[in-house]
Image (spheres, grey):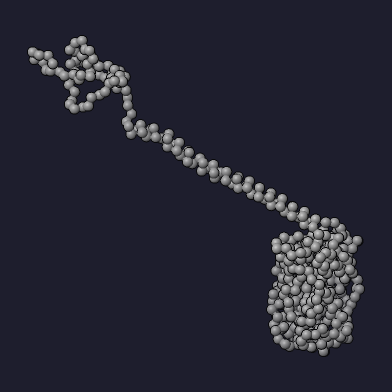
């Protein structure tokens, strides 16, 4: 303040005057305010006075950015960084998880394969006695020697054999002792054998003769592979093992005590071991014969459910075991496989003409319904105690007459209830023939009753005969 002056008093902030030489302050330089670290803007209490000079240089502040925009601009890179740091690990995890899973699966698979190879090596080096011992990791059906039985009951648990769950089928061939020949055909043989070791047992071994062709070997291998697909069934011959590492090939199956049904029936007729007897008996009864047909139908019902076409169903290919239980044997063809002239190529032209359906004879078509036709002929064989079908007729006449609609007549000692079932199988239209399931139900109804549907006391020996050795036929 200047005393004695009429001009208004101008008060300058004490911090804004630094050694001023005169009362007129120099215009402040913007840089001095902005760059001086000791400068502090005083709190605004009153509006600042107007400057003395009319044209002072106005301080020019550096352009500033609003705080909201600066925060948004500053936070945008941070948000992007946060998003990348969150999403990228997730994407990497999703992308590499399948790769890690595949690697882990391959490692586990490799370990399992190595363990399997070690187990197979250990098994091949072990003795057969160790192979036949009970194992907690196997479901074992123990090999047993045949036992005598006089019951005619249908036993569902009669099948015997050693069948591990892991299906180790190969058997050491040097542990088989051949006891005798059970039967033979043009190219094949069936031997009665005994397994060596702590658990000795009787088995049947099917093999080929030395003159067998590659086609015959392929057929036997095919039969082995088909039998491997089957579970034990009381009315189907069970596969126990095989020897396929080198020739000769061996198909090892359960030993069925009484052999072929055809021979079993014929021998009972020759020795007159039949009659309408009831209860336990060593002789054949009407109920036995009905049960034979029922057993065959049950076995074929199971095979057809597994897609198996027999193509040669006949009494000669049915085996009789303990308790007079019949088992279907000699099969090995898969469903929907139609092979032209399968029997000619398999057996040098020998055909089971008397058991074949018309579509098989003339069109080489084989289905489950052609097996049903053959089953009707098997029933006729059972009723006539193993007689040759179409008695008194040559093979050529059989083919012609069947095509014309001829069917074998009802035997005098056979009641209509049984004949209707077998005649039902001989319908010209395959679609109208029964299924094996229907045949099982029809025969089961006959077994429930106590009637003698086959009157063996009236069996006429002179009316039927057996034909053997005809060329061009498979009998």
Residue 193 falls in image quadrant: bottom right
Residue 167 falls in image quadrant: bottom right
Residue at 76% from the left image edge and 86% from the top image edge: 279
Residue at 52% from the left image edge and 42% from the top image edge: 91
> In this orientation, does residue 254 appear?
yes
Q: In this view, does 295 lie above or below 101?
A: below
Quadrant into which the N terminus falls: top left
Residue 50 falls in image quadrant: top left
Residue 176: x %, y % from top left:
85, 64
Q: Is residue 222 above or below residue 408?
A: above
> In this orientation, does residue 399 appear?
no
In the image as oriented, which residue stretches furthest toward the front? 198
Q: Is residue 13 above or below residue 385?
A: above
Residue at 74% from the left image edge and 80% from the top image edge: 153
- Residue in front for this viewpoint, 26 or 12: 12
Residue 40: x %, y % from top left:
26, 23
Residue 43: x %, y % from top left:
22, 27
Q: How many marks?
A: 0
- Residue in front for this viewpoint, 9 or 460: 9
Q: Left or right? Give the position of 454 relative to 271.
A: left
In the image as oriented, which residue stretches furthest toward the bottom? 457
- Residue in front for this viewpoint, 182 or 337: 182
Quadrant into which the C terminus falls: bottom right
Residue 160: x %, y % from top left:
76, 70
Residue at 70% from the left image edge and 84% from the top image edge: 448
């Amino acid at each position: 303040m200047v005393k004695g002056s009429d001009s208004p008093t101008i008060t300058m902030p004490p911090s804004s005057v630094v050694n001023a030489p005169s009362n007129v302050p120099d215009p402040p330089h913007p840089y001095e305010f902005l760059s001086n670290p000791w400068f502090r803007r005083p709190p605004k209490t009153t509006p600042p006075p107007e400057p003395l000079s009319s044209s002072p240089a106005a301080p020019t502040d550096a352009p500033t950015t609003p705080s909201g925009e600066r925060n948004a601009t500053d936070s945008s890179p941070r948000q992007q960084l946060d998003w990348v740091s969150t999403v990228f690990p997730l994407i990497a995890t999703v992308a590499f998880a399948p790769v890690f899973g595949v690697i882990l699966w391959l490692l586990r698979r490799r370990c399992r394969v190595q363990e399997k190879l070690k187990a197979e090596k250990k098994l091949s080096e072990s003795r057969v006695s160790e192979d036949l011992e009970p194992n907690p990791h196997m479901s074992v059906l123990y090999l047993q020697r045949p036992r005598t039985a006089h019951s005619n009951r249908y036993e569902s648990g009669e099948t015997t054999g050693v069948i591990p769950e892991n299906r180790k089928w190969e058997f050491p061939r040097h542990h088989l002792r051949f006891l005798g020949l059970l039967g033979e055909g043009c190219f094949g043989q069936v031997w009665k054998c005994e397994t060596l070791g702590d658990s000795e047992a009787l088995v049947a071994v099917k093999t080929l003769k030395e003159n067998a062709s590659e086609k015959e070997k392929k057929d036997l291998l095919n039969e082995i592979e088909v039998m491997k697909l089957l579970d034990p069934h009381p009315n189907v011959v069970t596969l126990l093992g095989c020897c396929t590492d080198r020739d000769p090939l061996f198909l090892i199956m359960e030993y069925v005590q009484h052999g072929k049904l055809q021979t079993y029936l014929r021998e009972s007729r020759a020795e007159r071991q039949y009659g309408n007897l009831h209860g336990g008996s060593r002789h054949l009864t009407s109920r036995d014969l009905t049960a034979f047909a029922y057993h065959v139908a049950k076995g074929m019902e199971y095979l057809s459910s597994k897609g198996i076409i027999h193509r040669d169903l006949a009494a000669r290919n049915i085996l009789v075991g303990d308790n007079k239980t019949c088992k279907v044997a000699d099969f090995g063809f898969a469903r929907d496989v139609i092979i032209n002239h399968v029997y000619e190529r398999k057996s040098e032209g020998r055909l089971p003409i008397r058991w074949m359906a018309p579509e098989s004879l003339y069109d080489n078509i084989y289905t489950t319904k052609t097996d049903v036709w053959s089953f009707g002929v098997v029933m006729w064989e059972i009723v006539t105690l193993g007689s040759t079908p179409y008695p008194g007729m040559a093979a050529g006449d059989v083919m012609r007459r069947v095509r014309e609609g001829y069917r074998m007549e009802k035997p005098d000692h056979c009641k209509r209830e049984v004949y209707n079932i077998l005649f039902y199988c001989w319908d010209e239209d395959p679609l109208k023939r029964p299924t094996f399931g229907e045949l099982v139900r029809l025969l089961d109804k006959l077994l429930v009753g106590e009637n003698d549907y086959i009157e063996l006391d009236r069996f006429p020996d002179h009316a039927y005969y057996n034909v053997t050795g005809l060329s061009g036929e498979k009998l």
